[in-house]
Image: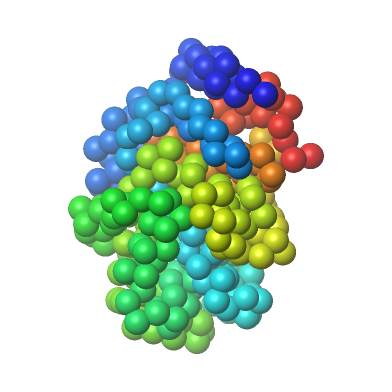
């Protein structure tokens, strides 16, 4: 497969269309990002690397980090996780309160805000210093000690995080939050603030394309069964209330973030990351969604 030729061709085509949408202005710091950045990186399970555009510029990965938080919690807790968070698509916006109240404080899945907050609460209970331990976990996956939280983004998110505060208080009332609310939210905002490049993200997520095994160290991050389940949740729930559309058009498990990044996995083949900050009305990268649709069409590399 001539991945580089295809990346070049599809990147050129995506640049030719109008870059619609807007950056995530409800988080003030994200509004300052150049909206015209556009980078792609593809890493294969044989550690071959292909890239084009702004693939070496770090950006706020935002909700993409929810997959890694889930992975760390799932490593330790296994199936017990699903007593406190579901695995169903939400069909509602990622910060919706309505569904959460109706379902008595049990979030639909770990990738909507409420679900990721519950995962953070679980990490708070599992680790004495969860921020450090989570950062260590990501650095180990990325094989890079220079990945960090971004304090400016953390403070920016805290200044406008009223809906997340409402979500966690509602879940606390239903008994699904066990730790101090402020401490759990602090962990959540820090996790979302992490900045990585397309290159770093693609290689960090590569274990999900390799039956849960790290392609460089050979360490088993997850069992095959748990890897399959993480990929399945990404397939069904990775794009807020646009997951069905992504599955239909792209045909890969994936996860987006409002920083404009998208990670997609082709099991047993590759991980691809696209970054373009302008978001569509559903909160997903406009150009990134188009790129991945055309890329999987061009390469005939859907999982279906």
Q: In the image, what residue occupies the spot 45% across and 23% down?
A: 52
Identify which residue, 235 or 7, lies in the foreground: 7
Note whether residue 248 is visible: no
Identify which residue, 213 or 131, lies in the foreground: 213
Identify which residue, 248 or 223, lies in the foreground: 223
Q: Where in the figure is residue 85, as x and y percent of width and height? A: 59, 72
Q: In the image, what residue occupies the spot 41% across and 51% down?
A: 143
Identify which residue, 35 or 225, lies in the foreground: 225
Dividing the image into 4 quarters, which one contains the C terminus? top right
- Left or right relative to 31: residue 276: right
Q: Where in the figure is residue 173, as x and y percent of width and height? A: 46, 84
Tag count: 0
Above/below status of 237 relative to 121: above
Dividing the image into 4 quarters, which one contains the N terminus? top right
Note whether residue 208 is visible: yes
Q: Quadrant of residue 2?
A: top right
Q: Where in the figure is residue 268, as x and y percent of width and height? A: 69, 44
Q: In the image, what residue occupies the spot 39% across and 35% down?
A: 277
- Residue extending farthest to the front is 217
Q: Quadrant of residue 125?
A: bottom left
Above/below status of 207 relative to 161: above
Please, which colouring scheme is shown?
Answer: rainbow
Above/below status of 39 relative to 18: below
Q: Where in the figure is residue 45, as x and y percent of width and height? A: 61, 42
Above/below status of 145 relative to 258: below
- Left or right relative to 59: residue 273: right
Q: In the image, what residue occupies the spot 48% across and 73% down?
A: 118
């Amino acid at each position: 497969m001539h991945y580089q030729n295809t990346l070049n061709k599809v990147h050129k085509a995506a640049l030719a269309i109008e870059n619609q949408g807007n950056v995530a202005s409800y988080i003030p710091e994200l509004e300052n990002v150049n909206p015209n950045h556009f980078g792609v990186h593809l890493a294969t399970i044989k550690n071959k690397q292909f890239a084009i555009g702004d693939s070496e510029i770090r950006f706020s990965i935002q909700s993409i980090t929810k997959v890694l938080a889930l992975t760390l919690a799932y490593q330790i807790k296994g199936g017990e996780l699903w007593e406190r968070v579901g695995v169903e698509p939400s069909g509602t916006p990622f910060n919706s309160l309505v569904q959460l109240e109706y379902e008595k404080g049990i979030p639909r899945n770990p990738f909507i805000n409420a679900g990721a907050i519950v995962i953070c609460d679980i990490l708070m209970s599992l680790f004495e210093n969860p921020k450090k331990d989570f950062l260590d976990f990501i650095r180990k996956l990325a094989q890079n000690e220079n990945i960090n939280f971004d304090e400016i983004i953390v403070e920016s998110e805290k200044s406008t995080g009223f809906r997340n505060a409402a979500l966690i208080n509602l879940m606390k009332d239903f008994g699904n939050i066990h730790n101090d609310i402020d401490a759990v939210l602090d962990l959540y905002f820090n996790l979302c603030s992490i900045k990585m490049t397309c290159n770093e993200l693609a290689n960090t997520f590569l274990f999900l394309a390799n039956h849960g095994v790290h392609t460089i160290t050979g360490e088993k991050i997850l069992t095959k069964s748990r890897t399959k389940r993480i990929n399945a949740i990404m397939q069904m729930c990775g794009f807020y209330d646009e997951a069905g559309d992504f599955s239909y058009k792209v045909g890969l498990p994936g996860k987006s973030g409002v920083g404009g990044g998208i990670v997609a996995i082709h099991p047993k083949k590759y991980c691809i990351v696209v970054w373009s900050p302008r978001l569509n009305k559903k909160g997903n990268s406009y150009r990134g969604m188009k790129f991945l649709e055309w890329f999987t069409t061009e390469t005939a590399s859907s999982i279906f």
